[in-house]
Image: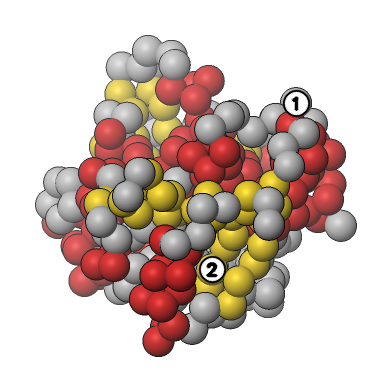
Amino acid sequence: MKAYAEVIGDPIAHSKSPLIHRHWLAAAGIDADYFATHVKPDELAGFLASRRADPQWRGCNVTIPHKQAIMPLLDRIDPAAARIGAVNCVVPEGDELVGYNTDYAGFLEPLQPMLAETHLFRMARILGAGGAAKAVALALHDQGFTIVVGARNLDQARALRANFAPDEKLIAPLDHFATPIAFDWDNRDGILDVVVNTTSLGMKGYPPLPLDFSHVPPNAIIYDIVYAPLETPLLAEAKQRGLRAINGLAMLIGQAADAFRRFYGVDAPRQDDEALQAKLLA
């Protein structure tokens, strides 16, 4: 059997990871494959034991509900994944199984051109405080952002901020951002503002995110990690207002590229990302 990697979860049939990785494997001319493997919670330990003994296995991506449960079954956890408290990528390294979190790097990837610039101040408003928000918050915190968290569950918001900088003044109920405010924004020259939706609101089958744009600074970047639909109501309004908009496919492809490099030891061939996005949206 040739070399392979895979994504595991319960359920797993919906995953787009095989499409992404097979696209890159073909483009790179790598004789390997990538599968979606259904692993139930009570099968997780047995799955890892069987893969340890397989010399063709290059690793796996990990999705719901295994991102926390898999951690005590691994030999080593990357420090960033340990801080986030979740693993979504496992790689065999020598005799060890090592856990990583590629959401951190994947989220930052489309922001890199802006992060390479010098700013007087960086501020992010993160809407949502679930699992994805933790990777997003830590990534932005490490890039020097002051972070406000808006969440339906304020205890979750406090727990999220406790990972980097507890501050009761910088959390708010999510519905606070749905109510218009009369605020005279100051001069934002030299300031990088980012507003990130990490909730499922705006996703197909869910209501839109209730955000009134009076809460959004001029020239802010609006980043929605939802990718189905590609243009959520939040991003559509951002574009109408002339704001920079980043969709969820950017993070999906970015985190997959980080995993691909770990699996196969080469960078993912990114020269035809537009063709890949078209496949993902077909």
Give residue 19's position: percent from left, percent from top.
Answer: 74, 54
Q: Secondary structure at mark 1?
A: loop
Q: How many marks?
A: 2
Q: Type of residue at label 1?
A: Gln
The residue at the far top in this view is 118
Q: CA distance from mark 1 to mark 2?
A: 27 Å
Residue 29 visible: yes
Residue shown at 15% from the left, 46% from the top:
165
Residue bearing mark 2? 8
Give residue 192's position: percent from left, percent from top.
Answer: 41, 26
Q: Secondary structure at mark 2?
A: strand
Residue bearing mark 1? 271
Residue shown at 81% from the left, 55% from the top:
281
Residue 222 visible: no
Residue 264: image quadrant is top right
Looking at the image, is mark 1 or mark 2 earlier in the sequence? 2
- Position of the N terminus by quadrant: bottom right
Horizontal side of residue 83 vs 11, given as left or right = left
- Asked if 172 appears above or below 187 in the picture, the reply is below
Give residue 143's position: percent from left, percent from top.
Answer: 32, 30
Disc 1 and disc 2 in contact, CB within 8 angstroms = no
